[in-house]
Amino acid sequence: MTDSNPNASLTTPSIPGDALPPVEQHAQQYATVRNAHETELIEDYVELIGDLLAHRGEARAADIANRMAVSQATVSKMIRRLNELELVTSKPYRSLFLTEAGQKMAETSRARHDIVLHFLRALGVRDATARIDAEGMEHHVSDETLAIMQRFTEQQHNS
């Protein structure tokens, strides 16, 4: 008899005690994910603005809209939010610029992204898939896990 579950090969045997963690730990897991969701879009925009400034010398709303596959109206709303959070500065019809806080956030986000991307590649994940997966994972990985990912990648690179 064949298993009709297309993800059957992805399931692992149940380990006793893994079904439900203690209440406090479970609550912390969900709180951590909620916090990551709150900041991930902001981090994505700031990271992209930083990348555009570094690679093209300017970050225009139209370029952001094209690269994120969203409307210019959506980008304009986010730019207003980033201005309110004092992460970017902007002038009408001009490029965006990162504030010191925005630059720091962009650098941190880029570093996290690169660690996850290189880790996935070290595991043998195809580049296109690794790029897509890293884009979401970077926001949800703890510093502890990132450090282990980085060590693993360095060990793979040095062996």
Image: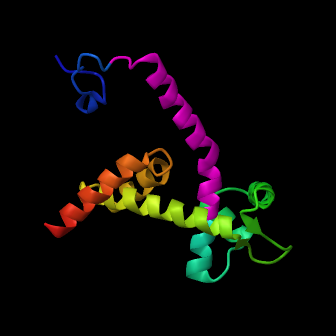
| 138 sits to left or right of 44 | left
Colour mapping: rainbow
Residue ranking furthest to the left: 159
Relative side of 61 to 120, left or right: right
In terms of image quadrants, where is residue 1? Answer: top left
Q: How many numbered marks appear?
A: 0
What's the residue at 86%, 73% (across, down)? 92
Q: For the point 64% across and 42% down, which residue is it?
A: 38
Magenta-span inclusion, residue 36: yes
The correct choice, above or below, for 2 with respect to 112 in the image is above
Where residue 4 appears, as percent x and y from the top left, is: 28, 21
- The quarter in which the C terminus is drawn is bottom left
The answer to which image quadrant residue 88 occupies is bottom right
- Point out residue 97 in the picture as x, y percentages from the top left corner: 72, 74
Instruction: Residue 58: give x, y in percent of width and height.
Output: 67, 79
Say which of 140 and 134 sits in front: 140
| Res 128 seen here | no
Q: Position of residue 57 (x, y in %)?
A: 63, 83
Vertical position of residue 5 compared to residue 126: above or below: above
Q: Which residues are magenta?
A: 19-47
Asked whether residue 9 appears in the rendered view, the answer is: yes
Horizontal side, residue 15 vs residue 105: left or right:
left
Of residues 54 and 152, the one drawn nearer to the viewer in this rendering: 152
Q: Is residue 24 magenta?
A: yes
Above or below residue 8? Residue 136 is below
Question: With 16 as the anchor, is 97 left or right in this view?
Answer: right
Q: Residue furthest right?
A: 92
Task: Report the magenta stretch's main SS.
Answer: helix
